[in-house]
Amino acid sequence: MSQRPSASREWNAAEYHRLSTPQFMWGQRVLNELHLRGDECVLDAGCGTGKLTRLLLQNVPRGRVVGLDVSRNMVLHAQQSLRPDFGDHVQFVAADLLSLPFLGRFEGIFSTASFHWVLDHDALFRNLFQALKPGGWLHAQCGGGPNLERLRARVRTLSRTSEFSQWLAAFSEPWLFSDAQTAASSLCAAGFEDVRTDIEAAAFAVPTSEEFQEYLRTFVLHRHLELLPTEQLRERFVHALADASAHDVPAWTLDYWRLNLRARKPE
């Protein structure tokens, strides 16, 4: 099936905003670890619909936040939500994290649930390093280690079946779930110091098959589903995965693992 070039860069912003409770909870924890003066200029790298950008703005009342996301849908949603309340204290940019249009601009970079969508972490960390002012910090979290390992194994098996193999058998995973040691080495190679990385479990269970399927469509498998040519095939794909997960304990659990990243650019 032919695919629009921009399709893989876009998200369903409204559904993401409605269903992003676990991402928001993880992000709140990461944000609460920051000790801000209140006048910093901070990049929210992968801002999504702006839920966490709002909290970040509240913590820098005399500063500024730039929200960046590769998805124009996300950027538009965040802009419409936040500009009326924060005016010139917030700006938004639709850009790829591998092509950041900034050089030495930020005191800090904050990011959650985004870096695992970037397949070249060496280039990512070099770009983030260049976007920071001397002494600037990186405070981030993304999927890492054995993130969604059980689900991914089922997806690979299902993708090779006769019903789906024509479109998915050769499709490479669209994520990079780095381990803590590899991430630390990449950060150091990019020039960062005071590097700290660790992995933590963050499994998230939902009460029904229907909600589990909504999460798969919106957060996990939208790149896979874009490749299937009919809505019927897409529905059968996520339904089969939900049926398999119904037998897990607890049922309908997303086996998330988070990679925490802390680093600083030398003065």
Image (cartoon, rainbow, N blue to C red):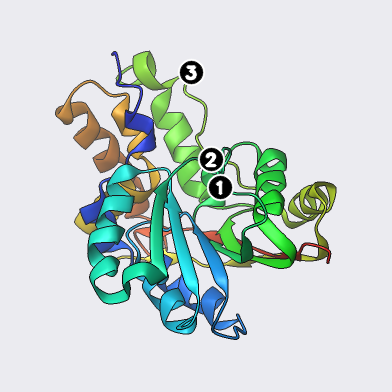
Which residue lies at the image location 40% right of the left edge and 71% below the top edge?
A: 89
> Residue 85: x and y, percent?
27, 76
Q: How many angstroms separate mark 1 from mark 2 (CA)? A: 5 Å
**Which residue matches tag 2?**
175
| Residue kind at label 2, given as amino acid type | Trp
**Which residue matches tag 1?**
116
| Residue kind at label 1, given as amino acid type | His
Say which label, 2 or 3, has the lower sequence index.
3
Say which label, 1 or 2, has the lower sequence index.
1
| Vertical order, 7 against 108 (above or below) | above
10 Å crowding of disc 2: few (<14), some (14-19), many (20+):
some
141 lies left or right of 136: left
10 Å crowding of disc 1: few (<14), some (14-19), many (20+):
many
221 lies left or right of 257: left
Q: How many angstroms separate mark 2 from mark 3 (CA)? A: 15 Å
Q: Quadrant of residue 11?
A: top left
Mark in the foreground, 1 or 3 = 1
Mark in the foreground, 2 or 3 = 2
Q: Tell me if I can see residue 161 in this picture.
A: no
| Residue kind at label 3, given as amino acid type | Ala
Who is closer to the viewer here, 25 or 55?
55
Say which label, 1 or 3, has the lower sequence index.
1
Q: Quadrant of residue 90?
A: bottom left
| Vertical order, 103 against 202 (above or below) | above
Who is closer to the viewer here, 130 or 28?
130
**Contact check, label 1 and label 2, Cβ < 8 Å:** yes
> Residue 193: x and y, percent?
84, 63
Which residue lies at the image location 36% right of the left edge and 68% below the top edge?
A: 88
Which residue lies at the image location 40% right of the left edge and 60% below the top edge?
A: 91
